[in-house]
Amino acid sequence: MNKSEKERIEADATTRAILAHWDQINPDDRIAHLVRDLARGFNRSLQTRLADYGVSFGHWIFLRAMWHRDGVTQRDLAIQVGLTEPTAHTAITKMVELGYVTRRRREGNLKKQYIFLTKAGKALESKLVPLAQEVNQVALAGIDEETQKVVRSALLKMVRNLALDEANALAEGKKIPSTRSLGAGNL
């Protein structure tokens, strides 16, 4: 690490605390903590870039989902991004004000409102997706392709294991609390 890299890292107390934890305090801490800190790093890095375009991280989460699947209900969108309906409602209301999305009813179903990207919301994709790709490139710098494949495979296996654990808990009648927030990883 060169001098300017060290100076940048030292300028941020959060970064210093995270690095100290993993370098000195508890380098063998649980994988869950490592993944949480990694997700925070991804999110902070993307937030910094999104700010240049005046887009909040919370709006990014919904835009990203809608670029893949437009014209969904607020409830479906909340489920898709892993957030609560009240959180989705607040974000969507603000996104309507900003001109990124509209709410419309579909013919034949006047009860449900569907969320659609506007032209401005669609146009953000070509500007913002490269920012997320850049963050991923920054994170993967110096990691060979084979190691990247191993890491991806291991992380996907962990996702599947935890999803099965949740499904088993639900099948046993256990309630799963809704604890997801905008801080969860969505890069």
Image (tube, helix red, strand yellow):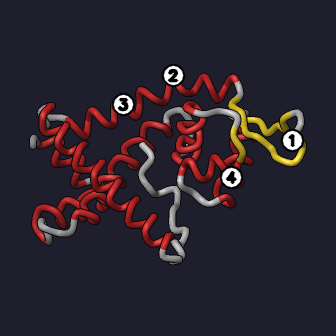
Residue name at image x 45 percent, y 64 percent? 167
Q: CA distance from mark 2 to mark 1?
A: 32 Å
Q: CA distance from mark 3 to mark 2?
A: 11 Å
Residue to which mark 3 is pinned? 133
Tell me which numbered mark, 2 or 1, is placed earlier along the sequence.
1
Badge number at residue 75: 4
State the SS at label 2. helix
Q: CA distance from mark 3 to mark 4?
A: 28 Å
Tell me which numbered mark, 3 or 4, is placed earlier along the sequence.
4
Residue to which mark 2 is pinned? 126
Query: Considering only vertical position in the picture, is 36 above or below 168?
Result: above
Q: Position of residue 101 (x, y in %)?
A: 71, 35
Residue name at image x 51 percent, y 62 percent? 180
Location of residue 22 (image quadrant): bottom left
Residue name at image x 63 percent, y 46 percent? 77
Residue to which mark 1 is pinned? 109
Location of residue 158 (image quadrant): bottom left
| Structural crowding at the residue carrying mark 1, measured as other residues with C-alpha within 10 Å and reported as few (<14), some (14–19) or many (≥20) | few
